[in-house]
Amino acid sequence: MSEPSPIVLIVDDEIQIRRFLRTGFELNGFVVHEAGTGTEGIRAATLRPIDIVIVDLGLPDMDGSDVVERIRSWSTVPIIVLSVRSAEAQKVRLLEMGADDYVVKPFGIAELLARVRVALRRQSRAASGEPSVTVGPLTIDLASRTVTLNGQRLTLTPKEYRLLQVLAQHAGNVVTHQHLLKEVWGSIHMQDTHYLRIFVRKLRQKIEPAPDSPKILVTELGVGYRLAHTADAENGAAVTATVG
Amino acid sequence: MPFTISLHRLRQEMRGLLLTLCLVGIVTAGIFTFVWSVGLTRGTVVYLVPVLIAAMRWGLIAALFASACGVLASAFFFFPPLYSLEIRDPQEVINLLLYIVVAVVVSQLASRLKNELEKSHKREIDLRDLYAFSRRIAVAFDVSDIQSAIEDHLTAVIQRKVVLFATARDAAGNARRRADAAVPPQVLAEIEKLEKADDRRPSTGDPVVADDGEAWLVRAVSPKNPEFGFVAVNLGRPSHGHSDADDLRVRVDAVLADATATLDRLGIAQAINEARMRAETDQLREALIGSVSHELRTPLASIMGAATVLSTAPALAGEPKLQALVQDVRSEAERLNNDIENLIDATRISSDGVKPRMEWADPSDILDSALDRCRKKLSRHTLSLNLPKDLPLVHVDPVLVKQALVQVFDNAAKYSPPGSTIMVAARARDGRIVLNVSDQGAGLSESELPHIWDRFARGERTASLTSGSGLGLWIANAFIAANGGKMDAISDGPGRGTTIAIELPVAQATVHPMESDQDE
């Protein structure tokens, strides 16, 4: 990265977690700020320019979701939440409050860095108005509303395209079922997850090289879907993706 | 005889009197025939027959009434002057007086006999019930058995709806749980009051009247032993007058005293205490496991995170031995994390039950993410997937089903040799989806087969060769059951592989054609 070092704010009450995160981020060229409580974290986010916020769910003074809500009330800075397993309902709530993604504890630093990079890239893409998203062999041109797979243009129905478009706008980050349903079918169908299942199945037949083990349109069980990104390649998925 | 007579009682009494009158009428008609055909004139003594019958069947009042009717009838019909209540012959007057004396004595004797008979019959029934009760108590297995025995016994003896509560707290919980035994809040309040009272005796002993007008009698089963709990007896609407309710109250207290004596004799209080203690110990253990595992999760997150940072550290880049050590730290932490997650799942199942978050899910999505999670564990096995393209959607908690599948894959990987094949197949059948996971591993013997779903179950043949807590399949089974499905294990025998089948119900999803695609 030739740009100036991105600044990360870590809000976590566990000093050991903050310590390894600091080391991990600094090794990868980030500037790190720390906060031990929610209040401190919110203040730190107002005081200096921050590129990305990492928030732990269980803070001593307030719930992580409150921190997300408060920061979101004035800032669009990417927020990634550290959550525990089997708390899907909580993850969904956090994402709806404006968190960009979550990582389940315990996690490896590479996993978190991947999510952070995706979120940062999305932010910069949004700022520069970059019109197209590429995931492996798939390219979605948001300006001309065309989708190509290995250079060949795909024919998608309007709803299939809309689904792909919403996912592409959040490329790399998870998008909740509710958000997708609202964007594609309207708010009265927010509970009708079976529409989504059937459409995702159809869409995968068109865009996935092997629809049985999807690598591009990935399921996040109990939460939503994610359009895979560069970062996911290291998880074993043979996907290389570049933006723009 | 109490002066207040209930309507019901009065009606019964009236019926007795009416029937008595009929009897007297019949006797009169009979004597009349005799007088006509035979010329017999002194038939008064025959009126003792209705007196006897009335005394045996309807009691003293009816018998006295029969005597009076007899006197009047003979005076009217048979003593000259006929058809007038006047009696001319003094000898007939003496006859009649004698008849009255005999009739009254007979009435009393006969009705007393009747009462004795009734009482002994009732006592026999009570004794039989009490005996059945004590037999049932003696074989009762746990607290709830004992409680339901007490409840059933009281219901049978008092012949009213009886609800038993262990404690006031239980009362509130029960009222919510048991829709059939809807207990009004006034009763719950009374139970709470009773529990707080020093001697656990009701202050007034009067029934509590609920909003719907039904009266409930609330009592501690035994004032001495709090273990037995409280009963609420539904007395119904008190519209029949008060004496009924009073009778019942006396009866309830008597039955309770009997029941308590039986419970004391069998040492039930101690048994209940012991059973409760056992339950509490279990709860404590669960709570301990639960909190300890949550506490362990936090430092583990630091260990794993730190290990991953170390492994990428430039300082270690040229140190393969140190790198390997760091790798070990990480993989061991991962293993520990797995065990802790299993413990957390296990406490979740046994403490507050599994609460699935149902949604429409694609079974292949669930399978895919379970396989993804187990990728590392399955890396030394060949995986063969056989999934139809048109699998129906299932309405389940996908995360729970995935975790169950992860446990099954974990088991298959653990108990089958590296290089062997693990087959995963899915098919829809009769409104259900069946997922089969087959391995070519250790298999199960007939004696092992029924126990694999037990908590902490571990095969004796393999326990020394593989690590594990024996929680995996138990957790999987509980998670699948919470989703309305069931699990099955099939094995041809030791060394011949195992197939685990997971069945999930398929519900019909409706997709309106207008929502499907055309519009935009």
Image (cartoon, rainbow, N blue to C red):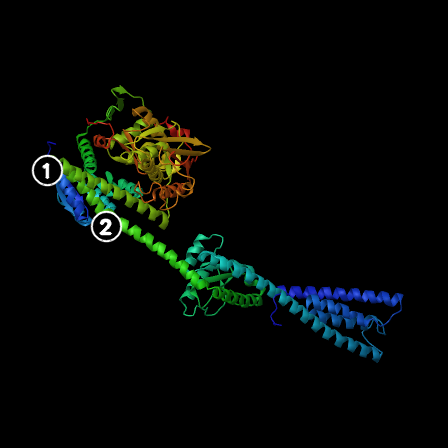
What's the residue type where badge 1 is placed? Ala
Chain hosting mark 1 = B
Q: Which residue is mark 2?
A: A62
Image side of residue B16 versus residue A133, left or right: right
Q: Nearer the viewer, residue B223 or A222?
A: B223
Local SS, label 2: loop
Three-letter code, disc 2: Met
Disc number for residue B315? 1
Query: Which residue is situated farthest in the top direction here?
Result: A152
Residue B454 or B370: which is nearer the viewer?
B454
Image point 75% across, 67% down: which residue? B50
Disc 1 on helix, strand or loop?
helix
x, y (%) of residue B99?
Answer: 78, 75
Q: Is residue B403 above or below residue B261?
A: above
Pointers 1 and 2 in contact (C-beta within 8 Å): no
Q: Which mark is residue B346?
A: none
How far across and down, in percent of the image, does residue A76 sit?
20, 39
A92 displayed left or right of A124: right
Query: For the residue carrying disc 1, how many other residues have a C-alpha within 10 Å: few (<14), some (14-19), or many (20+)?
Result: few
Q: Estimate the x, y position of residue A88 in percent, counting from the top left.
A: 30, 41
Q: Is residue A115 left or right of residue A158?
A: left
B364 to B260, vertically: above or below: above
Looking at this view, name the residue that lies furthest to the bottom: B90
Which quarter of the rendering shows the C terminus of chain A? top left
Q: Nearer the viewer, residue B167 or B209?
A: B167
